[in-house]
Structure formats: structure tokens, C-alpha cells
Image (tube, helix red, strand yellow):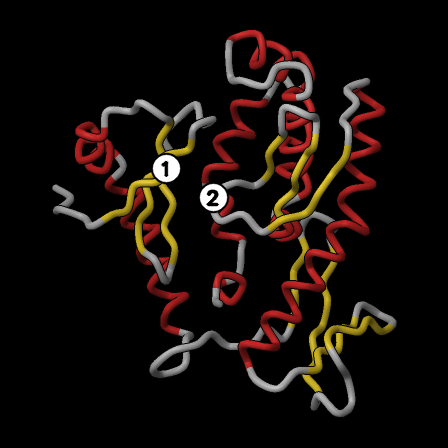
Amino acid sequence: MYGPIPYQIRVLPRARTVRLRICPLRGLEVLVPRGYDCRRIPHLLEAHGPWLDRAFADAARKRAILPAGHGDPLPARLDLRALEERWQVEYCPLSRVRGAQERISHRLLIGADDPAAHRAALRAWLKAYTRHRLIPLLEAESQRLALPYRQAAVRGQRTRWASCSARGTISLNYKMLFLPSGTVRYLFVHELCHTRYLNHAARFWHLVEQLMPDYREAERRLAESWRYVPLWVEME
């Protein structure tokens, strides 16, 4: 029997199902749709006991690599699964390099004063790289599916991978760069379908299924995709 577990509840108005997310630093988050009966959560956690055991063990391994006291080791490489790229990261004194500078052979030089500034520079580069690489892929998918959108933006949401506004603006989370390419494509399809149906009604899911028959499996993979995001990305 899985014992009582502390957790935080996050209400996502546009969510269709409940999701469990374990963050190495914040613990267990239960992401629920608006109107969900939160009295059902303890039973839900008990039903997912084996998965929670594995997820908490993985989170513990990630916390174990933190330096004593606080902080997160700065990454020596970036595994950008969305693009099947691996970038080597080097850190230089601020006097030599300011911010992030790309070099040949997927090398990235980061110049900053302290670890927090290094992480900020890395996040800024990831956002810029998302605009440079993922937005053109979104545009190509939009044209292929004949589902136009108005404009695209890049953000760093904590609980959403992407979103589509009523005005047709699709926002991509730069953390998508760490996800497998197949999962990223599903996110593109999902948000592009919202340009036609902004809610998660049956006709929306029917369109998703028409365009991606295996979307249920993609949804299952998506629910576990936060494990691909490195710990340092969430550090402020």
C-alpha cells in the first residue's frame, strides 16, 4: 500500500485529463482540469503507486547530483532530442564571452559571472534556438495539414508544452527542445487542431485522430515527457 504523499494541485482550465508530474525540486504536482473533484486524488495516487515509486526514485537520483546545499551542476552538454542534436557547452569568463555564442561542431560558449547567470544565458539561448529551429518546423507542419495559425511565440511555461490562443497565436515552450522528435510533432498537430477547435470537445479529438491515428499513445508518452527536461532548466 502506498502511504500518504504530499502533493501540490495545479488547475489547468484547458486540460482534458489528470496528469501526475514529479519535479526533483518541487515534488509531486497533480495537474487537474477545471471542475475536477480533488477528493479523488488519494485514490488516483494509490492506483499509480508503482509508477510513483519509479518516478520518485528517478527524482532522487537527480537530486543526488546537486552540490551540497543548493544549486544544480551546469551542463557539459545539451541533448536536444527534438532536433537529434547534441551540443557541447563550455563556460568562459565574462571578459572573454558575453552571453551565449555558437561555434562550429555544435559547441556553445557561455560567458557569465556565476552559475545563476550561466543558467539564465543557457535558457536565453534555448529560447532563441527554439525560434530559429522549431518555429519553421511548426510552419511546415501547418502547411502540410492546411491548418494555418496567425503567429508563433516562444515561452518557458512550467505546466504547458504549448498553447493556442483564440486569436490563433501558438506558443511553444522552449523546453520542447529536450523532447523526442515524435512527441514534438504530436504537440504541433495538437495545437494546430486548436486553430479550428479551441476546446477539447469530441470534434477536436476526432480531428486529431484523423491527422494522427496513434495520438493516444502520443498522449501517454507526453504525460511522462517532463523527465527529459534537465534539472538545471527549472532553477532560478
Q: Tell me which numbered mark, 1 or 2, is placed earlier along the sequence.
A: 1
Q: Where is residue 47 in the image (x, y as percent from the top left)?
A: 23, 32
Label 2 packing within 10 angstroms: few (<14), some (14-19), many (20+) = some
- In this view, 174 is above or below 207: below
Cα separation, mark 1 vs mark 2, equals 8 Å
| Residue at the spot 36% in from the left edge and 62% down from the top edge | 25
Residue type at tag 2: Thr
Relative to 236, 196 lies left or right: right
Which residue bears the numbered disc 2?
Answer: 159
- In this view, 32 is above or below 25: above
Q: Report if the CB atoms under discs 1 and 2 are less than 8 Å apart.
A: yes
Q: Between 19 and 135, which is closer to the camera in this rendering?
A: 135
Q: Between 120 and 137, which is closer to the camera in this rendering?
A: 120
Q: Where is residue 181 in the image (x, y as percent from the top left)?
A: 68, 42
Q: Which mark is residue 223?
A: none
Q: In which quarter of the image is residue 16?
A: top left
Q: Where is residue 130 in the image (x, y as percent from the top left)?
A: 73, 51
Relative to 215, 167 lies left or right: right
- In this view, 229 is above or below 106: above
Which residue bears the numbered disc 1?
Answer: 31
Q: Is mark 2 on a helix, strand or loop?
A: loop
Q: Which residue lies furthest to the front in this view?
A: 167
Residue type at tag 1: Leu
Q: In which quarter of the image is residue 191?
A: top right
Label 1 packing within 10 angstroms: few (<14), some (14-19), many (20+) = many
| Residue at the spot 71% in from the left edge and 43% down from the top edge | 153
Q: What element carries label 1?
A: strand
Relative to 139, 33 lies left or right: left
| Residue at the spot 35% in from the left edge and 83% down from the top edge | 68
| Residue at the spot 63% in from the left edge and 24% down from the top edge | 166
